[in-house]
Amino acid sequence: MFKVLYACITEEHDIRLVVLAGCICIFGSFTGVSLLVRAREAFGKRRLALLSAAAVVFGTGVWTTHFVAELAFKPGLPIAYDTDLTALSLAVAIFVAWVGMLAALRFNAPIAGGCIIGAAAAAMHYLGMAAMRVPADIQWDVAAVALSLLTAFTFAATGLWSLWRGPAWRYRLTATGLLVAVICGLHFIAMAAIRMVPDPAMPLPDNVVAPDLLAAMVAATTIGIVMLGMSVSIVEEHLARRANYEAKGLRCHQEQLARVLRISGIGSVERDLQTGHVDWSPEACRIFGLSPHQIRHTRDSFYDLVHADDRSLVRAAADQSDSGIASSPLEYRIVRPNGDIRVVYRENDFVVDAAGHPLRRVSVFKDVTEAHAAQEREKELQRQLLHSQKLEALGTLAGRVAHDLNNTLVPILALSKLALEDLPEQSTLRGDLETISRASERARDLVKQILAFSRKRELVKQQVDLAGLTRDALRMLRASLPTTIQIVDQILEVPKVFGDHGELHQVIINLVTNAAHAIGGGIGKITVKLWGSAEREPAMSGEAGSVVYLSIVDTGCGMDKATLDRIFEPFFTTKGVGDGTGLGLSVVHGIVTRHGGRIDVRSKTAEGSEFTVLLPAVGQPSKPACIETAAAA
């Protein structure tokens, strides 16, 4: 290409003006390319403004390059230029270049747009040549003209295609070089295509501009190009810095917002009410247990994530929001794809246009499952605290009453026995005194149970073989229980527990006896199970270690929920008057609690009950220790 250009530049050209024309061409091409890159990245009116500036700079650069090179042409004949065609060539260069750039941007067609830009350069050149007035007959070399047009179209299309590969500097410089080749190659090849035959008789028209005036016009245009290019570059640089600063600030705010939402556990789902498109935030995906590729932008797919029992509630709220009214805050359950059930809290609002019409609905979600669980745990702890305080108060009251009753019963029981010893067998008063003595003994036993429930006393704790203790207790119970009740033992060898032998024996006796009373006089079965576990239950205190389970299951009458809530209360009983004291299960609860264990109850009316005692097993040998137990709680 450069050899062709060199051959086309003959001795008739002023090399200084040729160099000036090349510099103008390079500046105009580079500035136009830079503006076109900015226009491609912009939107709306800013894109149109940058596109127009690029077309003006490039078209004016082509025009200026052409006429500076024309001024460099010295054929030895007087030359003038037609005013109208000269102005028209500038307008055509700008307009056609604008059309080419618009086509490339609007339709993403850089090759077609480049061909149009090449046509702009060709049209400008040949209109400029047509504006040249010289006293000579101009003859054209058709082959050279065709070569000039081919050069313009090929290099312009290639240049724009290269620019469309990316905004990097290597693509910009490549496009600039190819457009310079378009302008310079077209001009000098086309200049080589003409041959002037002098004709002194050919007059010059009146509407022409002299070369000196044209030089002034070209100089003014060159200054305008430089000023326009520099102004646009300065403005664009300022806007680019401002945009980068705002983008950096926006990214920072977005990161902060995302961090806050992630820490607070709040996710959002935004629906475009016109298109139906739905955007899920990363935190919303985490709450619902979805990955981005699992999201389906349909309402039914969202309802599939809602728990079946809450689906109607969510549908009603959605129907309300469809009418443009933000629904009230709502809590409901969702089912994640892995089957995990969570509770979410949801609020929504609308983004509206200037007329108040809703455009988008934004729903925010928060996983409140742990908060609900914490509330339930707090309620349970409050219930247990109230229950413990109630038991403590009742225990204190019972202890005081039992102490006074015991003092009252001592003389009654002692004197009634002494009177019986003094009365003859045939005395009519003997039967009355025996009744008094038996009633006093029963009252004494009741006082002993009350004192066992309420008083503080020192217990000697040591390692207890609970399996052997349970077998011994069952052997004794089999002899005392009705034959209609079958006792089935499933006792495994378990680690020893650290506790009081007598109190643990009392726990087994009381629970089995209570089960027998639940069966009554009918046929039934009591199953006693004993087994161990390697992991400590979460609700048990102490260091990690194994647990021993003692379970007593009966086929008796069972209990309803109201009874279950009160079975460990002192003096509460479902038996008739004179048949029970209501202290058996209260004593069991106190003993198990003092041993660091827990007792769980499951029961259903007419199906029986199951009492399960959990006791911490001995992890390593321990020496017997004396501790002061607190009142039953």
Image (spheres, rainbow, N blue to C red):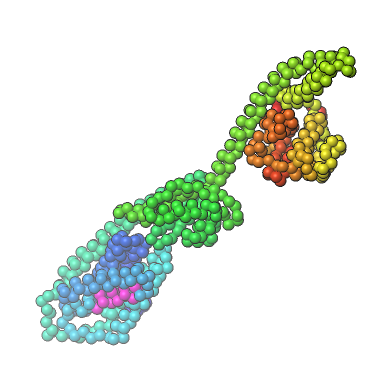
Residue nearest the observer in this picture, 390 or 571: 571
Residue nearest the observer in this picture, 616 or 280: 616
Q: Residue at x 36, y 77 (%)?
A: 154
Residue 72 x %, y %: 24, 73
Residue 498 x %, y %: 79, 33
Residue furthest to the right: 425
Q: Quadrant of the C terminus?
A: top right
Residue furthest to the left: 206
Q: Is residue 523 magenta?
A: no
Residue 44 visible to the viewer: yes
Q: On the picture, is 242 further left or further right than 432?
A: left
Above/below status of 594 relative to 59 = above
Range covered by the magenta-colored residues: 113-126
Residue 567 x %, y %: 68, 35
Q: Residue at x 66, y 28 (%)?
A: 391
All told, the count of numbered labels is: 0
Residue nearest the observer in this picture, 501 or 587: 587
Q: Quadrant of the N terminus?
A: bottom left
Where is residue 222, by image quadrant?
bottom left
Q: Residue at x 22, y 71 (%)?
A: 91
Where is residue 544, by image quadrant?
top right
Q: Main secondary structure of the magenta part?
A: helix
